[in-house]
Image (spheres, rainbow, N blue to C red):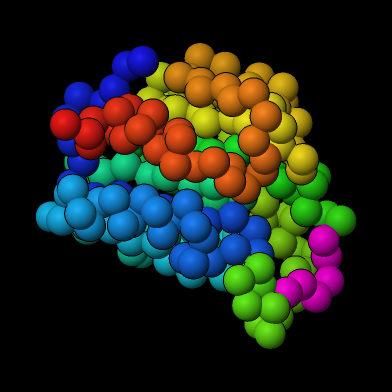
Amino acid sequence: MTRIPAPPTHLLYLHGFRSSPQSFKAQRLQAWLAMHRPGLTWWCPQLPPSPREAMALIDAGIAAWPRHQMVVCGSSLGGFYATAVADRVGCPAVVINPAVDPARDLAAYIGEQTAWHDPEQRFFFRPAFVDELRALTLPRIRHPERILAIIAKGDELLDWREMSARYAGATQHLIDGSDHALSDFDHHLPTLLEFLNLCD
């Protein structure tokens, strides 16, 4: 597996639909970095339901980051966003069970939704958000060589074959079994860290 040339100094992690910075993958990665790379800048923002607003928040948050020293990671819808960010700024990305066509898939979720980590929190997924997702969808991934796609064949929500085809040309870590949440994330964390040139 190829790795990026130099260890990054800044890492952006983007959570999925209905998720939050409390995502266990985000928590596990942040804990590892705090122990082994305490000088690295970590940011995992709570993303608003509106894709347009989410990207505006991300753009503002990384505006001063060094483009040649940053990386972005994302899971599910966060993987879709991470792909868009990587395309915009030219940085490497790691995507975990990335949403390939969220405009298509999330059209079924228009209406009131509950937050995964706090069901007391509710938000409304508006029809306009589908159009915002469509506007963010890249016709093609221009630099797949900068991307590691971690894809679980056991994903119960997304088709692994569609994910693999979308990220053709990227480094792919295909997992037999597992699930959409990548519940066995700890087993695959070393692959992510090696690609990002973070492990010793």
Q: Nearer the viewer, residue 152 or 124?
A: 152
Give the residues drawn in magenta, as a range.
109-114
Q: Quadrant of residue 88?
A: top left
Q: Residue at x 59, y 25 (%)?
A: 175
Split into 4 quadrants, where in the image is the N terminus? top left
Magenta: main secondary structure equals strand
Farthest residue, direction bottom:
120
Q: Does the magenta segment cover residue 110? A: yes
Horizontal side of residue 13 vs 112, given as left or right: left
Residue at the extreme left? 39
Residue 195 seen in this snapshot: yes
Q: Position of residue 122 (x, y in %)?
A: 70, 80
x 67%, y 29%: residue:
177
Q: Nearer the viewer, residue 168 or 152?
A: 152
Is residue 5 one of those drawn in magenta? no
Residue shown at the point (64%, 23%) measured from the top left: 176
Image quarter (top left, top right, bottom left or bottom right) of the C terminus = top left
Q: Position of residue 171 (x, y in %)?
A: 45, 19
Count of marks overlaid on the render: 0
In the image, 125: left or right of 26? right
Give the quarter of the image for residue 191. top left
Question: Which quadrant of the view contains residue 162?
Answer: top right
Residue 72 vertical position relative to residue 58 in the rendered view, above or below: above
Q: Between residues 110 and 120, which one lies in front from this camera angle?
A: 120
Looking at the image, residue 169 lies above or below residue 185: above
